[in-house]
């Protein structure tokens, strides 16, 4: 069960945050903060976690005390330098003499990467609402050229503004909402056609 050591929660307002840690060759672990407690789910099993820094405050990493289902472990975590866009999300975890390389993703990142893969396969991608909310800004227009990751729509949900980005580079084919519209979870807001 060493994969649960890649605990990193997304900092956001509200009672629940979700992050996911994926070993590059292993299973996916979902970490969620529910009612102030961290819950890790691996292979349909859920574990309560408690984790505290016990030493180290610099960029070389730090030691942590990790409590899983009443059993205490000591782990060392350090961020790995990377030249690509995942540089802030890749970590080395050392536990029981073994080292694991993990990539930590929040739900938004997972959604965008999934949309980018689907869009690249079809030549077009959809920008969908990740949750119900209010469209507060649309910084692009139909026909505009956008880069992957560029904000297409700003959605207000749970008192937070969420930038919804183009999952692929291309042209804004269609905007299906206007400023002030209320949208539902999963609703298609825009379509981006690949170059």
Image: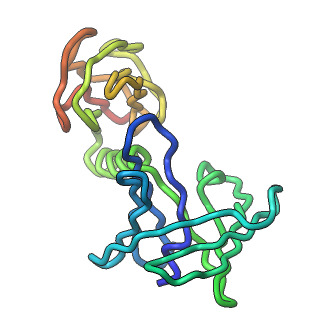
Instruction: Name the residue nearer the viewer: 194 or 113.
Output: 113
Q: Locate the C terminus by quadrant.
A: top left
| Residue 152 pos. (x, y %) | 38, 23
Asked if one can make out residue 69 in the rendered structure from this viewpoint, the answer is yes
Task: Tell me what residue is drawn at x 52 percent, y 67 percent.
Answer: 50
Above or below, 30 against 148 in this view is below
| Residue 29 pos. (x, y %) | 41, 69
Task: Tell me what residue is drawn at x 64 percent, y 65 percent.
Answer: 91
Q: Residue lying furthest bottom in this view?
A: 97
Above or below, 30 against 74 in this view is above
60 left or right of 138 in image: right
Colour logic: rainbow
Task: Tell me what residue is drawn at x 30 percent, y 78 percent.
Answer: 45
Task: Tell me what residue is drawn at x 65 percent, y 53 percent.
Answer: 87
Instruction: Name the residue nearer the viewer: 152 or 44.
Output: 44
12 left or right of 60 in image: left
**Tally of numbered discs:** 0
* Quadrant in the picture for residue 190: top left
Above or below, 57 against 154 in this view is below
* Quadrant in the picture for residue 140: top left
């Amino acid at each position: 069960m060493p994969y649960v050591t890649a605990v990193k929660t997304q900092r956001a307002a509200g009672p629940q945050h979700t992050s996911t840690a994926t070993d590059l060759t292993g299973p996916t672990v979902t970490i969620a903060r529910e009612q102030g407690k961290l819950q890790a789910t691996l292979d349909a099993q859920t574990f309560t976690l408690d984790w505290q820094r016990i030493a180290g405050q610099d960029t070389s990493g730090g030691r942590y005390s990790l409590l899983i289902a009443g059993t205490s472990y000591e782990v060392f975590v350090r961020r790995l330098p990377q030249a690509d866009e995942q540089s802030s999300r890749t970590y080395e975890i050392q536990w029981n003499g073994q080292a694991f390389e993990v990539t930590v993703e929040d739900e938004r990142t997972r959604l965008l990467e999934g949309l980018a893969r689907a869009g690249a396969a079809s030549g077009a991608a959809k920008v969908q609402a990740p949750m119900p909310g209010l469209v507060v800004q649309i910084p692009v227009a139909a026909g505009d050229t956008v880069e992957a990751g560029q904000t297409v729509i700003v959605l207000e949900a749970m008192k937070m503004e969420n930038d919804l980005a183009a999952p692929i580079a291309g042209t804004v084919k269609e905007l299906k909402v206007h400023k002030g519209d209320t949208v539902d979870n999963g609703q298609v807001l825009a379509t981006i056609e690949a170059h």
